[in-house]
Image (spheres, rainbow, N blue to C red):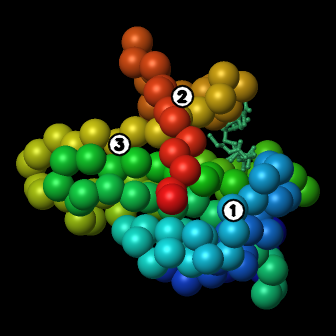
Amino acid sequence: MNNLTIKYNELTAEEFISLWESVWDGAPSLEQTELAMQNTIFRVSVYDGDKAIAMARMIGDMGLCYYIKDVVVRPEYQGKGIGRMLVNELLKFVNDNGIKGTQVFVELAAVPDKIPFYEKIGFTTNEAQRLKIMYEVK
Ligand SMILES: CC(C)(COP(=O)(O)OP(=O)(O)OC[C@H]1O[C@@H](n2cnc3c(N)ncnc32)[C@H](O)[C@@H]1OP(=O)(O)O)[C@@H](O)C(=O)NCCC(=O)NCCS
């Protein structure tokens, strides 16, 4: 833990895919991920030496809506406060970049067993349901 470093907007597509594969199946392609990294408004990543061990990113319009995506901590580093630190870094980004004195939506989708993690950071659930379509780009 002592050697961990944090970086801003340096997470690469390769690191993203490696972190994804540490917790989920079906990682996206390098091409799709590179485009996504370019268009992400804020990326946070944590390193143990040279190895990326955690990430989180924010997408959004900066004015009204921010959306948290892909909060991942490698399994062997979980339970040490890194996930909370990442989400707090994303919230700091909102505070640093939003228009002072306004309220903005900071949203995310979480599977049920991850909801308590976000609740501990201050998020609340509401009655809205997540709708999605996996749209095929032709
Ligand atoms: C969810 C995740 C990011 C949490 O990261 P983490 O570094 O293990 O979490 P932290 O150590 O910062 O935990 C912060 C607090 O949340 C709690 N917490 C973490 N995961 C939890 C869970 N699944 N259920 C209940 N509480 C949880 C911790 O116990 C801790 O509580 P405390 O402050 O009272 O001690 C991590 O488990 C992960 O990468 N999971 C796989 C990917 C994933 O599902 N990401 C979320 C996408 S919605």
Residue 28 is labelled as: 1
Q: In percent of the image, x 60 and y 70: which residue is there?
A: 33
Q: Amino acid at mark 2?
A: Glu
Q: Are marks 3 and 2 in contact (CB under 8 Å)?
A: no
Instruction: Identify whether 61 is placed above or below 37.
Output: above
Q: In percent of the image, x 47 and y 27: which residue is there?
A: 131
Q: Amino acid at mark 1?
A: Pro
Distance from Cα at disc 2 to Cα at disc 1: 28 Å
Instruction: Identify whether 20 is placed above or below 104.
Output: below
Q: In percent of the image, x 25 and y 58: which residue is there?
A: 61
Q: Which residue is mark 3?
A: 106
Q: Amino acid at mark 3?
A: Val
* Ligand 1 quadrant in view: top right
Among the two numbered marks 3 and 2 on one chain, the one whose residue lies closer to the N terminus: 3
Among the two numbered marks 2 and 1 on one chain, the one whose residue lies closer to the N terminus: 1
Quadrant location, the N terminus: bottom right
Instruction: Identify whether 85 is placed above or below 35.
Output: above
Distance from Cα at disc 3 to Cα at disc 2: 13 Å
